[in-house]
Image (cartoon, rainbow, N blue to C red):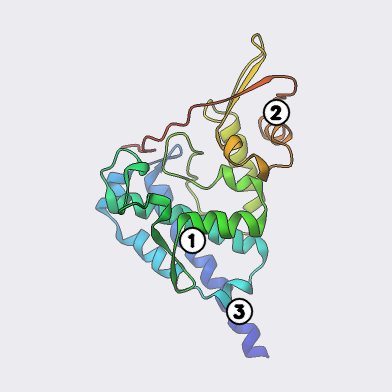
Amino acid sequence: MKKFALLFVGLGIAIAASAQNLTPILKQYVVEGRIDYRGLKANPDPLAAYLKQTGRVSETEFNAWGEKQQLAFLINLYNASTLQLIVDHYPVKSIKRIRQGFKGPWDQPVVSLFGKKITLNTLEHKIIRPEYKEPRIHMVLVCAAKGCPGLRNEAYTAEKLDAQLDDQSRRYLTSPLGLKIDRKKGTASISAIFKWYGGDFTSVATFIEKHSGQSIQGLKINYLNYDWSLNETRK
């Protein structure tokens, strides 16, 4: 029994270390939410090593973690796998141009999880959304487009997860990408994320007010055009 307990302590340390391995990559290549893909492609080994490490995590190990540790791991895996997808096809003007036959970028098996290859859509829509029911994930899962929330320059961790999710929500909803209000016209233009995933929010208006500090009650709601061009920056 003691050996069993020590095993899972060791595994918890291992996944904490994997998050620590992602943070230096993000700090080096993420600038104000956008990514230096050219630099990342020129030095691909650290990201590949991180994804190799996360790919070794077994389902049994994962199930032994707490919910916040699981969710932080899956968010990091989604974002890192998206980075790798872009690096593998860079230069590209938009993630939507990445195709494999009839399959778009989110339907290609590019994510290594529990010894299998799954798609980004499977990770988001079959695992993260239904299993964790956390609306703030829409503020942190990065789709490699300028219209999506910016990528954080640190990995998500169980210890800081709530603060990180709140901070990302605040950043997006206090930027013109997430929310624009014209009180003279009586309109609120909000991210198309709230149209696509409105059912994940108990109340879109309440969520926006909580994280932006602005009420949209009584305003006519419009949806902002989503910019699918690559969320790239160059140092």
Q: Nearer the viewer, mark 1 or mark 2?
A: 2
Quadrant of the rendering where the C terminus is positioned: top left
Q: Residue at x 57, y 42 (%)?
A: 139
Above or below, 136 relative to 65 = above
In this figure, which residue is indicated by the disc labeled 2?
213
Res 178 visible: yes
In this figure, which residue is indicated by the disc labeled 1?
20
- Which of the 4 image quadrants contains residue 9? bottom right
74 or 165, nearer to the observer: 74
Q: Are marks 1 and 3 in contact (CB under 8 Å)?
A: no
- Identify the secondary structure beneath mark 1: helix
Looking at the image, is mark 1 or mark 2 earlier in the sequence? 1
Residue type at mark 1 is Gln
Please give the count of numbered marks on the rendered protein: 3
- Which of the 4 image quadrants contains residue 53? bottom left
Apparent side of residue 62 relative to residue 44 in the rendered image (left or right):
right
Residue 78 on image: x %, y %: 48, 55
Q: Residues within 10 Å of mark 1 (few under 14, many from 20)?
A: some
Q: Residues within 10 Å of mark 2 (few under 14, many from 20)?
A: few
Q: Residue at x 64, y 10 (%)?
A: 185
Residue 198 on image: x %, y %: 64, 39
3D distance between C-alphas at marks 3 and 2: 41 Å
Residue 65 on image: x %, y %: 63, 70
In this figure, which residue is indicated by the disc labeled 3?
8
107 or 63, nearer to the observer: 107
Looking at the image, is mark 3 or mark 2 earlier in the sequence? 3
Q: Residue at x 30, y 57 (%)?
A: 44
